Image (tube, helix red, strand yellow):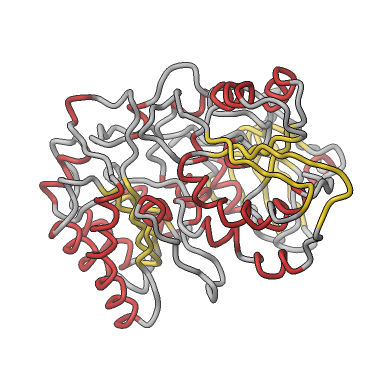
Amino acid sequence: MRHGVRVQHVEPDGLAARYGIRAGDHLLRINNYPVHDALDFLYFSARKRLRLEIKSRTGGLKTVCIQKRSEEYPLGLTAEPLQIRRCRNRCLFCFFHQLPPNLRKELYVKDEDYRLSFLHGNYITATDLTEADFTRIARQRLSPLYISVHTTDPVLRLKMLGRKQAPDILQILRRLRRHTISFHSQIVLCPGLNNGTYLQRTITELAQFYPYLLSIAIVPVGLTKYRPRAAQLMRVTPAYARGFLHQIEPLRQTLTRNLGRCILFLSDEFYLLAGRNPPSYRGFDMVPQLENGIGMVWQFYEHYGKAVRRLPKSLSQQRRVGVITSKLGESVLRRIIMRLNQIRNLRLDPLVVSNRLFGPTVTVTGLLAGKDILRTIRRHPGYDTYFIPANCLRPEDDLFLDNMSLYQLAASTKSDVRVVPNDVKVFIAEALGAIHER
């Protein structure tokens, strides 16, 4: 690792500026600890008393001593971003290798970086962790991590990762446990590969790591029209999903009973494909692995009962809303749309988008592209408002996967488009015509 991290930005009225630190300076050490990257900066600067060794942008060396009001008090500077470690796996099912051209540029960055796993919940296979990495993880208490396991069978895992050799995943997890590092795990389920007895073995062996194992998420393999044909992967069909749920439910219940808490979670997509309602997560302080599509349906409807009790019987004027959604999303929204359509002068219609970008096998809302949504709106003109699901957009700049912006979409349709988050209360307020500040 290189020594020193560059200061990217300094708040004009912050502590760092007050002590003469400028953008372009390099932080070399904090309290005598070498600083190699932004994570080191965050870790070592979480103290009240700081001694910063700095190489200024002009080349001089200086030492700055700072007394903060509290450990959480910000220094008022931003370190340069992490230099992302790239993934060397060639996973048979990797979504990265199934992407079309001309998408948002960050989608083409395939990372395998334990620092991003800790900071942002990115999944790693942990195949390329070095001795220095394990030492740092233990010393800085980088817990929890997010580990893609897929299978604990060593031969099958090599095949799935596209590797000739890699450390045994169980040995890696044992090492994390020895250092009391907790982790979430995920299994991308590929019919005909890591299902059946392989899956049961994987779940059973992972469960032995509880309580350091925080959760196991099983998600269906995603296959686009760009997938490599050599992989010969099968998709999760509605029939397969029904059979899978029937087989996995007893194991899930047994684990919950034996451990005293639920650790095995299935993506909502399995239930929706099978034509079933996903389970309730009432009683959980936080739904584990929400970003993996677990509990999103429950989160949307969490306050449904209270929200519908105050609905009006009619609106003072007619209002028509086109609800942009995917094939699976339509089944989720059916309940609330049917209820709102009982209000006189209000009409909501689900407008199901055909996913031309990725192909018809991709049926989730979060992978809808701006151009496909635009095409759908043009085919269904005349609505007062169009609802766009928030998970289609990058939140910081409202960009769709295909680089179309929300502004471009609205300008191209000359329509009122509203971004609606995953919350039934906001959905109802927007449907009734209330203004929601995003």
When asked about the image quadrant of residue 335, the answer is: bottom right
Q: Residue at x 57, y 53 (%)?
A: 43
Q: Is residue 361 above or below residue 425?
A: above
With 67 as the anchor, is 368 left or right in this view?
Answer: left
Q: Position of residue 351 (x, y in %)?
A: 58, 35
Q: Is residue 297 above or below residue 54?
A: below
Q: Residue at x 32, y 34 (%)?
A: 223
Front in this rendered view, residue 176 or 5: 176
Q: Residue at x 15, y 57 (%)?
A: 196
Counting the numbered discs, the total is 0
Question: In which quadrant will I find the C terminus?
Answer: top right
Front in this rendered view, residue 172 or 90: 90
Can residue 34 be seen from the camera position used here?
A: yes
Question: In which quadrant will I find the N terminus?
Answer: top left
Front in this rendered view, residue 158 or 1: 158
When asked about the image quadrant of residue 17, the answer is: top right
Q: Is residue 182 above or below residue 156?
A: below
Q: Position of residue 3 (x, y in %)?
A: 50, 36
Q: Position of residue 249 (x, y in %)?
A: 29, 69
Q: Position of residue 393 (x, y in %)?
A: 61, 35
Can residue 134 be seen from the camera position used here?
A: no
Q: Residue at x 38, y 30 (%)?
A: 360
With 263 as the anchor, is 158 left or right in this view?
Answer: left
